[in-house]
Amino acid sequence: MERYLLKYLLGWKNKKYRKPLILKGVRQVGKTWLLKEFGSKYYENIAYFNFEESKELADYFKTTKDVKRILQNLAFINGKPILPEKTLIIFDEIQESNDALNTLKYFYENAPEYHIVCAGSLLGIALSKPSSFPVGKVDLINIMPMTFTEFLMASGDGNLIQYIHSINTIEPIPDIFFNPLYEKLKIYHMTGGMPEPVTTTLDKKR
Protein backbone atom coordinates (compact mmCIF):
# COMPACT_ATOMS: atom_id res chain seq x y z
CA MET A 1 0.00 0.00 0.00
CA GLU A 2 1.35 3.43 -0.92
CA ARG A 3 0.47 6.69 0.80
CA TYR A 4 1.38 10.09 -0.59
CA LEU A 5 2.40 11.22 2.91
CA LEU A 6 5.49 9.02 2.64
CA LYS A 7 6.99 11.70 0.38
CA TYR A 8 6.28 14.35 3.02
CA LEU A 9 7.92 12.19 5.69
CA LEU A 10 11.00 11.72 3.53
CA GLY A 11 11.24 15.50 3.15
CA TRP A 12 10.99 15.81 6.94
CA LYS A 13 13.80 13.27 7.37
CA ASN A 14 16.10 15.28 5.11
CA LYS A 15 15.47 18.65 6.80
CA LYS A 16 18.52 20.33 8.27
CA TYR A 17 16.51 21.76 11.17
CA ARG A 18 14.15 18.95 11.98
CA LYS A 19 11.60 18.94 14.80
CA PRO A 20 9.90 15.90 16.30
CA LEU A 21 6.85 15.12 14.18
CA ILE A 22 3.33 14.42 15.44
CA LEU A 23 0.99 12.65 13.04
CA LYS A 24 -2.63 13.32 14.01
CA GLY A 25 -5.73 11.54 12.82
CA VAL A 26 -8.79 9.56 13.78
CA ARG A 27 -8.41 5.95 14.86
CA GLN A 28 -7.85 3.31 12.18
CA VAL A 29 -6.81 5.90 9.60
CA GLY A 30 -3.39 4.25 9.22
CA LYS A 31 -1.07 6.37 11.38
CA THR A 32 0.89 3.47 12.86
CA TRP A 33 1.19 1.62 9.55
CA LEU A 34 2.47 4.75 7.79
CA LEU A 35 5.16 5.47 10.38
CA LYS A 36 6.35 1.86 10.48
CA GLU A 37 6.42 1.70 6.69
CA PHE A 38 8.42 4.94 6.61
CA GLY A 39 10.88 3.56 9.14
CA SER A 40 11.33 0.25 7.36
CA LYS A 41 11.99 1.97 4.03
CA TYR A 42 14.30 4.78 5.05
CA TYR A 43 16.02 3.80 8.33
CA GLU A 44 18.29 1.00 9.46
CA ASN A 45 15.95 0.12 12.31
CA ILE A 46 12.85 1.20 14.25
CA ALA A 47 12.33 1.70 17.98
CA TYR A 48 8.56 1.45 18.52
CA PHE A 49 6.82 2.42 21.77
CA ASN A 50 3.06 2.36 22.39
CA PHE A 51 1.83 4.38 25.37
CA GLU A 52 -1.62 2.81 25.27
CA GLU A 53 -0.42 -0.79 25.30
CA SER A 54 2.38 -0.19 27.84
CA LYS A 55 1.01 2.08 30.55
CA GLU A 56 4.25 1.83 32.55
CA LEU A 57 6.11 3.45 29.65
CA ALA A 58 4.89 6.88 30.79
CA ASP A 59 6.75 6.45 34.10
CA TYR A 60 10.10 6.84 32.34
CA PHE A 61 9.07 10.36 31.32
CA LYS A 62 7.71 11.39 34.73
CA THR A 63 10.95 10.94 36.64
CA THR A 64 13.35 12.86 34.38
CA LYS A 65 13.56 15.35 31.52
CA ASP A 66 17.16 14.38 30.79
CA VAL A 67 17.11 13.27 27.16
CA LYS A 68 20.19 11.06 27.49
CA ARG A 69 18.67 9.25 30.46
CA ILE A 70 15.39 8.79 28.62
CA LEU A 71 17.21 7.41 25.57
CA GLN A 72 19.10 4.94 27.77
CA ASN A 73 15.81 3.74 29.24
CA LEU A 74 14.19 3.46 25.82
CA ALA A 75 17.15 1.51 24.45
CA PHE A 76 16.82 -0.90 27.39
CA ILE A 77 13.12 -1.41 26.64
CA ASN A 78 13.82 -1.72 22.92
CA GLY A 79 16.48 -4.36 23.47
CA LYS A 80 18.92 -2.75 21.06
CA PRO A 81 20.77 0.57 20.73
CA ILE A 82 18.95 3.67 19.49
CA LEU A 83 21.26 5.37 17.03
CA PRO A 84 21.09 9.02 15.95
CA GLU A 85 19.90 9.43 12.34
CA LYS A 86 19.80 5.64 11.84
CA THR A 87 16.98 4.67 14.20
CA LEU A 88 13.45 5.99 13.76
CA ILE A 89 11.88 6.43 17.20
CA ILE A 90 8.09 5.98 17.06
CA PHE A 91 5.91 7.09 19.97
CA ASP A 92 2.43 5.70 19.33
CA GLU A 93 -0.69 6.95 21.15
CA ILE A 94 1.41 9.74 22.65
CA GLN A 95 -1.73 11.52 23.85
CA GLU A 96 -1.75 8.98 26.70
CA SER A 97 1.27 10.67 28.31
CA ASN A 98 1.44 14.44 28.80
CA ASP A 99 4.97 14.03 30.15
CA ALA A 100 6.16 12.29 26.99
CA LEU A 101 4.47 14.96 24.89
CA ASN A 102 6.23 17.67 26.89
CA THR A 103 9.59 15.89 26.55
CA LEU A 104 9.54 16.37 22.77
CA LYS A 105 10.71 19.96 23.22
CA TYR A 106 13.82 18.73 25.04
CA PHE A 107 14.58 16.33 22.21
CA TYR A 108 14.28 19.24 19.79
CA GLU A 109 16.52 21.51 21.87
CA ASN A 110 19.10 19.03 23.16
CA ALA A 111 19.09 16.01 20.82
CA PRO A 112 17.95 17.02 17.32
CA GLU A 113 20.09 14.26 15.81
CA TYR A 114 17.50 11.71 16.99
CA HIS A 115 14.60 11.26 14.59
CA ILE A 116 11.28 11.09 16.46
CA VAL A 117 7.81 10.63 15.00
CA CYS A 118 4.62 10.33 17.02
CA ALA A 119 1.09 9.18 16.36
CA GLY A 120 -1.89 10.40 18.32
CA SER A 121 -5.63 10.78 18.15
CA LEU A 122 -7.00 14.18 17.20
CA LEU A 123 -9.19 14.41 20.29
CA GLY A 124 -6.55 13.18 22.70
CA ILE A 125 -3.93 15.69 21.58
CA ALA A 126 -6.49 18.49 21.54
CA LEU A 127 -7.45 17.70 25.15
CA SER A 128 -3.87 17.47 26.42
CA LYS A 129 -2.91 20.00 29.10
CA PRO A 130 -1.82 23.29 27.47
CA SER A 131 1.26 23.36 29.69
CA SER A 132 2.39 19.98 28.37
CA PHE A 133 2.15 20.73 24.66
CA PRO A 134 5.52 21.73 23.14
CA VAL A 135 4.31 24.72 21.11
CA GLY A 136 6.76 25.64 18.36
CA LYS A 137 8.98 22.66 19.12
CA VAL A 138 7.21 20.04 16.99
CA ASP A 139 5.83 19.67 13.48
CA LEU A 140 2.17 18.68 13.21
CA ILE A 141 0.52 16.97 10.26
CA ASN A 142 -2.94 15.49 9.80
CA ILE A 143 -3.48 12.15 8.09
CA MET A 144 -6.75 11.60 6.29
CA PRO A 145 -8.34 8.43 4.87
CA MET A 146 -6.88 7.14 1.62
CA THR A 147 -7.63 9.15 -1.49
CA PHE A 148 -9.31 7.42 -4.40
CA THR A 149 -6.00 7.48 -6.27
CA GLU A 150 -4.24 5.80 -3.33
CA PHE A 151 -7.02 3.22 -3.30
CA LEU A 152 -6.50 2.52 -7.00
CA MET A 153 -2.76 2.14 -6.39
CA ALA A 154 -3.48 -0.39 -3.63
CA SER A 155 -5.78 -2.35 -5.95
CA GLY A 156 -3.16 -2.42 -8.71
CA ASP A 157 -5.15 -0.28 -11.15
CA GLY A 158 -2.38 1.93 -12.47
CA ASN A 159 -4.06 2.09 -15.87
CA LEU A 160 -7.13 3.74 -14.33
CA ILE A 161 -4.92 6.27 -12.53
CA GLN A 162 -3.21 7.13 -15.81
CA TYR A 163 -6.58 7.61 -17.46
CA ILE A 164 -7.83 9.89 -14.66
CA HIS A 165 -4.70 12.01 -14.91
CA SER A 166 -5.13 12.28 -18.68
CA ILE A 167 -8.59 13.86 -18.42
CA ASN A 168 -8.44 17.57 -19.20
CA THR A 169 -11.90 18.24 -20.64
CA ILE A 170 -15.46 17.56 -19.51
CA GLU A 171 -16.72 14.76 -21.72
CA PRO A 172 -18.37 11.33 -21.39
CA ILE A 173 -16.08 8.61 -20.07
CA PRO A 174 -15.77 5.60 -22.39
CA ASP A 175 -17.38 2.45 -20.98
CA ILE A 176 -14.03 0.66 -20.98
CA PHE A 177 -12.93 3.07 -18.24
CA PHE A 178 -16.29 4.10 -16.76
CA ASN A 179 -17.42 0.61 -15.73
CA PRO A 180 -14.29 -0.39 -13.76
CA LEU A 181 -14.00 3.11 -12.27
CA TYR A 182 -17.61 2.96 -11.11
CA GLU A 183 -17.09 -0.46 -9.49
CA LYS A 184 -13.89 0.68 -7.78
CA LEU A 185 -15.57 3.86 -6.55
CA LYS A 186 -18.35 1.82 -4.93
CA ILE A 187 -15.79 -0.31 -3.08
CA TYR A 188 -13.84 2.80 -2.09
CA HIS A 189 -16.91 4.45 -0.55
CA MET A 190 -17.87 1.20 1.17
CA THR A 191 -14.51 1.09 2.96
CA GLY A 192 -14.42 4.81 3.68
CA GLY A 193 -10.83 4.86 2.48
CA MET A 194 -9.68 3.38 5.80
CA PRO A 195 -6.57 1.23 5.26
CA GLU A 196 -7.63 -1.88 7.19
CA PRO A 197 -11.06 -2.30 5.49
CA VAL A 198 -9.43 -1.48 2.15
CA THR A 199 -6.79 -4.19 2.62
CA THR A 200 -9.34 -6.76 3.82
CA THR A 201 -11.75 -6.03 0.97
CA LEU A 202 -9.09 -6.11 -1.73
CA ASP A 203 -7.59 -9.35 -0.37
CA LYS A 204 -11.00 -11.03 -0.63
CA LYS A 205 -11.32 -9.99 -4.26
CA ARG A 206 -7.88 -11.23 -5.30
Image (spheres, helix red, strand yellow):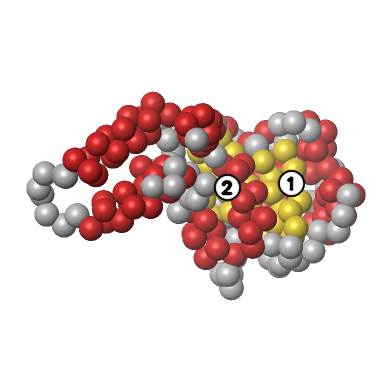
Which image quarter: residue 148? top left
Q: Residue 98: percent from the left, percent from the top?
A: 68, 38
Q: Which amino acid is tagged 2?
A: Leu
Name the one closer to the observer, 181 or 56.
181
Asked whether the viewer can see residue 155, the reply is yes
Residue in view at x 52 percent, y 42 percent: 24
Q: Residue 149: percent from the left, percent from the top?
A: 36, 47
Q: Which mark, residue 189?
A: none
Q: Which residue corresponds to mark 1? A: 48
Q: Relative to residue 140, is residue 178 drawn left or right?
A: left
Q: Which mark, residue 34?
A: 2
Q: Nearer the viewer, mark 1 or mark 2?
A: 2
Residue in view at x 31 percent, y 56 percent: 162
Q: Residue furthest bottom?
A: 16
Q: Relative to residue 51, is residue 24 drawn left or right?
A: left
Counting the numbered discs, the total is 2
Asked whether the viewer can see residue 123, the reply is no
Given contact means CB atoms under 8 Å apart, are the residues at marks 1 and 2 in contact? no
Report crowding for label 1: few under 14, some 14 to 19, many 20 or more residues within 10 A (C-alpha): many
Q: Which amino acid is tagged 1?
A: Tyr
Secondary structure at badge 1 equals strand
Residue in view at x 19 percent, y 54 percent: 167
Q: CA distance from mark 1 to mark 2?
A: 13 Å
Residue in view at x 65 percent, y 49 percent: 36
